[in-house]
Amino acid sequence: MAAYPIVQPLSRSRRSVYFIGLLTVFIVALPFLYLYATGYRFDGSTTLVSTGGVYVAVPHSGTEIYIDGELIRETGAFRRAFYIQDLDPGMYTIEVRKELHHVWQKELEVFPQIVTEARAFTLPNEIAREEIPKTFVIETASGTTTPIANPRYEEVLDFFTATTTALSVPEEILVSTLDKNEIDVQIATSTRESGGMQLARSDVGVIASWTRSVESVPFYFCIPHGACIDEIIVGPPEKEILYFDFVPGDNNLVLLALEEGVYVSEIDARDVQNIQPVAVGENIDVRVRDGVVYIREGDKLFEVTL
């Protein structure tokens, strides 16, 4: 039987040569690796320039991402975000598009050695909703039909007639017309909180503010190399906001009832603040209860899926 070949170990001198060679390569490459990791690139010659990047999270797969009108990529089934690097510092128009959905667009500034973040949202052009019937029709044993009231309709209707964020009555009037318990309800329903984000009514509209530690403040409250702001005005300027609440499951999006319809607005002070329609028309209202969105159009009630 043939003997197995015996592999001799490297000599001490050869191991020293290999070690010194690899160490030299590492030391020489280390500055270039550091510069690359911090955003420096060669501009086509021997000059190093400092670049930045953009990271945008998107809500759907099959979404197209554009920068300054140029298609960059399309998100896949399991990847709902994109990162574009090697961008020269400056302003860029970012667009997120999906077929049969509204377009999300924002002007984002790219800073040297900084990744600029954003969260896009694209509502469908036609929002899925299910009508809640006011009555049910039952057939009796004699073959006649009889309408009966739908208790769920009455329950949801009560959401629209109860005290809501739409109420904004001076305190002196409240004291003279309401008892203390009613005043407490008014005050409690003038704000909304979700995951550290607070919405509150003010003279300029709805204000979003962060209530937790400065270290955990969302990126859209802060400017790179600058101080963070305390508040962001939500919604279209000079529009009366009749009702507001968070979109269920997302403390970055706000439902707004205006005179001309119901809309969703992002909490982001950077141009432009995206506002997309849910239901457009007069005498349309919205309520959120137990994580469900309800729309009222006249005497019709709908459960809405966003």
Image: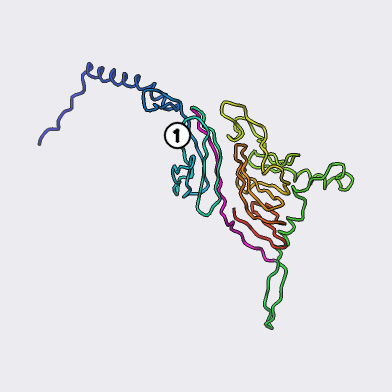
65 w.r.t. 162: above or below:
above
Q: Quadrant of residue 265?
A: top right
View extreme (front): residue: 69
Relative to 247, 52 lies left or right: left
Which class describes the residues within 10 Å of circle 1: few (<14), some (14-19), or many (20+)?
A: some
Which residue is painted at 59% across and 58% down in the image? 128
Question: Residue 178 appears at what percent x and percent y?
Answer: 86, 48
Q: Image check: 182 left or right of 207?
A: right
Residue type at tag 1 = Gln
Q: Secondary structure at mark 1?
A: strand
Q: Nearer the viewer, residue 183 or 93?
A: 93
Total numbered circles: 1
Q: Residue 258: x and y, percent?
A: 70, 50
**Residue to which mark 1 is pinned:** 85
The verdict on residue 173 being magenta is no
In this rendering, is residue 36 above or below 189? above
Q: Residue at x 75, y 57 (%)?
A: 158
Is 151 situated left or right of 78 in this image?
right
Q: Quadrant of the N terminus?
A: top left
Q: Is residue 128 magenta?
A: yes
In the picture, measured across the screen, residue 158 lies left or right of residue 13, that is right
Question: Residue extending furthest right?
Answer: 176
Q: Position of residue 112 (x, y in %)?
A: 49, 27
Residue 82 spot, x, y in % from top left: 47, 41
Q: Which residues are magenta?
A: 113-133
Asked which colour scheme the image uses, the reply is: rainbow
